[in-house]
Image (spheres, rainbow, N blue to C red):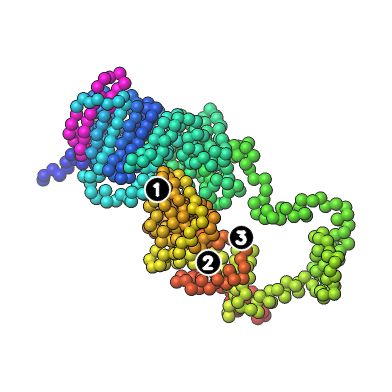
């Protein structure tokens, strides 16, 4: 019988390994930036073209390589970081497995220029599909320049799996930001298609955070710093008002390596509980330092998922450090967030309850009714509405005698009359707690969730706008300039054609800046920036939580962002419009996210509940 097991050729083995390490252009960006940091660079420049599909180039002023090392670095498992198995458990550098450059060379065309500072001549190497095409001396600046061209040119099937340029660029920006945050003492820049997106000077961690996330965070960061013999933590968390609906501004680093940990994220969320809504996520950039022997970073090819020997200690430490920081900076809540701010301004709360006011209140018939023994359930039917004013301390209108015009009436009858008036006219809906709309129907009544219902209405309106008739644009009298983070600017650029059909008139205006000339006609003017920023947050939320195409994400985001919020008072006409438009929808019973928009109550159900048949 013939032997059937063969060793894979090196170029195929390299491509298989590359499938784990280099999944997209951003993967190469991460590896090349980390190599530059490990080389001791103080300045690192990243250049990309066509979202990295055509070019990813990193130039650094690090130590450079000798001629032999320049050639060896492209071999599989060639590394300067590990000599013994024990070294694997004391790693403090970024790259160490010797897979990155070999993997890049297996799926792209690579050009390397490198020179050590003490040498006068450098080395130039050109590699194509893992094969060295050229190696020769060259003139080059001290340090290393490595360019990856035409990613996946030799694996067309994998190139077809890459996303749009905007999507791939967002991944590149994410990787760039993670490395730049980890090393604020180094200078970083990012240039895309000839335009500089980032230029980050050396500075403190706070300066780096603010320069990446935006100057408006400068006064909204709380310092976190705690030290123990086992581990240290330092960094920043955002004040509660900076919390967003997406996880975008959340960064954990362990020994300066960016990691993803749902466990540690849960510790942060617990520290912020009762301070932010349950569906919001706080901003944080936190750095944990501990002995590498307590960490296993070799559990995933990207090294972003790691294991700790005792996660419970870390969880408790992170949660405690953040709570202590928030308390120290007096960020913890001092007011009950459920209390209406308007109520807090009433005289009953802001002015002392004097003996005179006590005497006045105790003499009213309503006070006596509720304080007499066994009389708490009785309402004095001889009292009139004037007594309510006495109870709350409001002076009676002495110029106008109301008593002849108001017959004796009980409180219960006043409420009953109002409801009867609404109930007798089926066209008069009633708002309940500024969240729900109650409307009578022939068989009983329905209770409508005003936000969910309006979200469904807007969703179908936007859906129709993209497929049939675009929404009218309301031109701004004074166009606004919108400055966005580079990653968000990439996102908006990708959505511009669809945004135009949905009523937005946006025009690029230089680096990460747009001019807002108009907004959808049904959105209140003067709130353009908040509207677009809210739309971006919702879009990123859907991008992370659901696997939807871009258009579906966009219209769901706009519907949720522009829907009437719970807590907004509505007039009769507004409520009736919502009812009419909801039941004109194709799918009126659920919101785009699947929540019920209304619940119906049948008369026979009500009669059974009140035991009318007994």
The residue closer to the viewer here, 61 or 524, is 524
The quarter of the picture where the C terminus appears is bottom right
Q: Is residue 173 left or right of residue 338?
A: left
The residue closer to the viewer here, 339 or 525, is 525
Q: Which residues are magenta?
A: 114-135
Task: Residue under label 1, please give it.
Answer: 490
Residue, far front: 477
| Residue 113 screen position, x and y as percent | 26, 29
Residue, far left: 1
**Sooner in the amino-acid sequence: mark 3 or mark 1:** 1
Q: Residue 433 lies in what quarter of the image?
A: bottom right
Task: Residue under label 3, please give it.
Answer: 567
**Sooner in the amino-acid sequence: mark 2 or mark 3:** 2
Q: Is residue 133 left or right of residue 375?
A: left
Within-10-Å neighbours for mark 2: few <14, some 14–19, many 20+: many
Q: Report the residue at 86% width, 55% height from top.
A: 357
| Residue 531 screen position, x and y as percent | 51, 55
Within-10-Å neighbours for mark 3: few <14, some 14–19, many 20+: few
Q: Is residue 130 magenta?
A: yes
Task: Residue under label 2, please give it.
Answer: 453
Q: Tag 1, which secondary structure?
A: helix
Q: Can residue 498 be spotted in the picture?
A: yes
Q: Tag 3, which secondary structure?
A: loop
């Amino acid at each position: 019988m013939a032997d059937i097991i063969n060793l894979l050729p090196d170029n195929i083995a390299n491509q298989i390994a590359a499938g784990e390490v280099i999944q997209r252009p951003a993967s190469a960006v991460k590896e090349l930036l980390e190599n530059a940091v490990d080389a001791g660079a103080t300045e690192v420049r990243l250049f990309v073209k066509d979202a990295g599909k055509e070019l990813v180039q990193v130039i650094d002023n690090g130590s450079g390589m000798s001629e032999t090392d320049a050639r060896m670095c492209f071999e599989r498992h060639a590394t300067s970081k590990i000599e013994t198995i024990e070294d694997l458990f004391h790693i403090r550098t970024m790259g160490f497995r010797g897979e990155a450059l070999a993997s890049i060379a297996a799926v792209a065309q690579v050009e390397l220029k490198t020179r050590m500072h003490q040498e006068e001549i450098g080395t130039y190497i050109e590699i194509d599909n893992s094969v060295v095409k050229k190696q020769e001396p060259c003139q080059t600046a001290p340090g290393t320049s490595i360019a990856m061209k035409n990613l996946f040119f030799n694996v067309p099937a994998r190139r077809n799996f890459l996303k749009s340029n905007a999507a791939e660029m967002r991944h590149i920006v994410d990787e760039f930001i993670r490395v730049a945050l980890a090393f604020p003492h180094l200078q970083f820049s990012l240039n895309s298609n000839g335009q500089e997106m980032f230029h980050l000077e050396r500075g403190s961690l706070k300066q780096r955070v603010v320069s990446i996330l935006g100057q408006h965070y400068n006064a909204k960061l709380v310092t976190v710093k705690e030290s123990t013999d086992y581990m240290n933590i330092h960094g920043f968390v955002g004040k509660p008002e900076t919390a967003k609906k997406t996880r975008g501004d959340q960064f954990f680093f362990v020994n300066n390596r960016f990691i993803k940990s749902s466990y540690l994220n849960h510790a942060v969320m617990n520290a912020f509980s009762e301070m932010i809504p349950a569906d919001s996520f706080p901003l944080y950039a936190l750095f944990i330092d501990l002995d590498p022997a307590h960490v296993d970073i070799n559990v995933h090819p990207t090294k972003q998922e790691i294991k700790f020997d005792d996660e419970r200690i870390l969880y408790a430490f992170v949660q405690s450090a953040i709570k202590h920081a928030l308390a120290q900076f007096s960020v913890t809540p001092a007011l009950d967030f459920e209390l209406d701010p308007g109520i807090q301004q009433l005289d009953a709360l802001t002015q002392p309850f004097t003996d005179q006011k006590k005497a006045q209140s105790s003499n009213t018939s309503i006070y006596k009714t509720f304080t007499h023994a066994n009389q708490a359930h009785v309402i004095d039917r001889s009292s009139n509405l004037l007594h309510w004013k006495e109870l709350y301390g409001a002076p009676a209108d002495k110029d106008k005698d109301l008593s002849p015009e108001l017959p004796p009436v009980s409180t219960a009858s006043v409420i009953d009359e109002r409801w009867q008036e609404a109930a007798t006219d089926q066209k008069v809906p009633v708002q309940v707690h500024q969240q729900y709309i109650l409307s009578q129907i022939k068989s009983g009544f329905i209770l409508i969730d005003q936000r969910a219902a309006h979200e469904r209405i807007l969703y179908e309106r936007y859906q129709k706008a993209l497929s049939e008739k675009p929404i009218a644009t309301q031109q701004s009298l004074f166009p606004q300039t919108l400055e966005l983070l580079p990653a968000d600017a990439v996102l908006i650029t990708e959505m511009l054609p669809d945004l135009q059909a949905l009523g937005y008139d946006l025009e690029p205006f230089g680096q990460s800046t747009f001019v807002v000339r108009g907004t959808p006609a049904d959105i209140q003017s003067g709130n353009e920036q908040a509207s677009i920023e809210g739309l971006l947050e919702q879009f990123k939320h859907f991008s992370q939580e659901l696997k939807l195409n871009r258009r579906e994400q966009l219209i769901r985001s706009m519907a949720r962002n522009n829907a009437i919020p719970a807590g907004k008072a509505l007039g009769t006409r507004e409520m009736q419009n919502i009812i009419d438009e909801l039941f004109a929808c194709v799918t009126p019973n659920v919101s785009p996210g699947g929540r019920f928009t209304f619940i119906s109550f049948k008369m026979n159900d009500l009669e059974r509940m009140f035991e009318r048949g007994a």
